Every structure is written in structure tokens, then in C-alpha cells.
Amino acid sequence: MAAGFDAMAFAGLLRSLALYYGVPGRNRRLRAFYAGLVRPGDLVFDIGAHVGNRTRALHAVGATVIAVEPQPLLAGCLRRTLPGNRIVLVEHAVGGCEGEATLLISRRHPTVSTADPAFPDAVGTTAGFEKVRWDRSVTVPMTTLDRLVATYGRPAFVKIDVEGLEADILGALSAPVPLLAFEYLPAAPEVTAACLDRLGSLGAYRLNAVVGEDHRFVWPDWVDPAEAAARMPALCRSGRSGDLYARLVQ
């Protein structure tokens, strides 16, 4: 066994790979879903790239992808396996300011690792998180969406999945982008509420929802942030997390 080999962390990586690549047809459906939102040649940001399934789907529909992933093990996997063209890997956390952050890692469940120090206590006793232990921490560089925009250009689409820092990221965004998506968690309704409040002040956004990895919109209409907030309790009643997509109305 190689020196420094972390069997639990490796098992967590394999768990994530199985979750996001092991379901037949899931990534084909994801590519079809993104093809309806993103055009070939678009610049997109994947904030919280994890094991890269969304990065690969966006790349497959012709986008140039800035994939942002701070976890060293996952970033190393992406560095070795992502296509070399039209993808840039940024090994940073993204938050409300530039500098450094302490990343709290769950080696067994790396998908819920977080740079929000309050996140483990906020969700640790709720359904779906009872067995999660954040058992490692590392210091990582932190950047902002504004800095990514200044470096790479204004994206057509930004996907944000960062376990608790979604509102901080949107709060530090100084200008709206055409389309963005952020994760909602039934265990953290206050984060979703803060994101919706921010969108209301950032631009004329209309929203729709996707539950889990279903890759289809569940509402028949796109609604303003206030109406989306009113619909969230019913959406979260199942206990499943998902994504809210926000489209800027011109």
C-alpha cells in the first residue's frame, strides 16, 4: 500500500463516482437537459465540480467550462481525467471574499464537504446527514465569482453546488449573469431564502426547479423569487434536495 494512502477517502471517491456515473442513462439525460439551456461556444462555470459529471455534460454540448473544485483528492481525479480542450480546472473554493478558507471534508461522503463552518452543525442531525462526519480539514485558496468573471469572462451559465455558501457567493456577485443554478437543501432553508432574496435585488430573474438528478423542470411556469420562495416548502416536503435555475429576463 502506498505511503499516505487514505482508504476511507478513496472509498468516498468511489462512492461519488458510482453515484454520478453508475446509473444507466443519467448522464445522457443530463446532456440532453443542458443542451436545452447552453449553446455550443458558451462559457460556463461549474462551481463545485466534484467528480465532474456536470462539467463533462456541459463540455459535451459544446461549452467551454471553468470547473472549480477545492477538494484535493477530487481535484486530482479531475486533473487526470477531464478532457484537455475547452476545460479549465481551478482548484479553489468560491465564497464571499478572496483569501483562504478552511474546507471541512467528509472523507466518506465528499459530496457534502463544505467551506461554511456553520454547515455541519446546521444540517448534521437532519434527514440524510445523520451518518455524515466531517473528519478532515484543509486550508484552500478562496476566490469569488467576480474574480472568475474578471479572469475568464462573463459566463452564459453558472452552476453552484457548495454546501452552504451559495448565498455568500451570490452576495458577492456584482452583476447578474444570464442563467444560474444553485442547490437547495431541505435541511438548510435559510440558505435558499437568502439566495432568493439576493436574486430579487440582483436582476429580473425568473426561476424553475429540478428535484434531485431528475434533469427536468417541475414547475409549469417560471416564477419570480417571491413566488419561488412561497413554493419551496411544498417542494422540500419530500426531503429531496435539488437545484433552482434562475433565468435573467431581458
Image (tube, grey):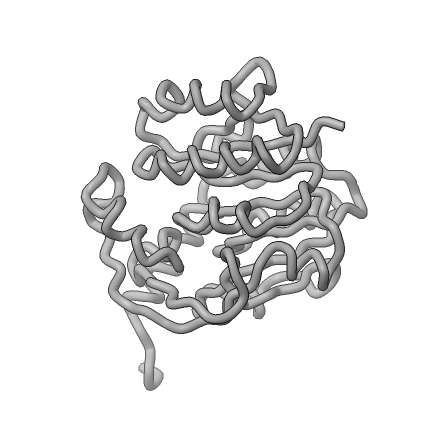
Q: Residue 18: x, y in percent?
A: 41, 50
Q: As drawn, which residue projects farthest toward the top?
A: 220
- Is 54 displayed left or right of 37 in the figure? left
Rendered image quadrant of residue 216: top right
Relative to residue 241, is residue 82 depicted above or below? below
Q: Residue furthest front?
A: 201
Q: Indicate left or right for 46 with 113 as reference.
A: right
Residue drawn at x 23%, y 50% is 121
At horizontal 45% and vertical 29% (from top left) the residue drawn is 211
The picture places residue 59, in percent across and down from the top left corner, at: 69, 50
- Farthest residue, direction bottom: 3
Vertical position of residue 64 compared to residue 192: above or below: below
Which residue is drawn at the image coordinates 35% and 31% (left, top)?
240
> Where's the C terminus, which quadrant?
top right
Residue 138 drawn above or below residue 23? below
Residue 174 pos. (x, y %): 64, 48
Residue at 23 percent of width and 37 percent of height: 127
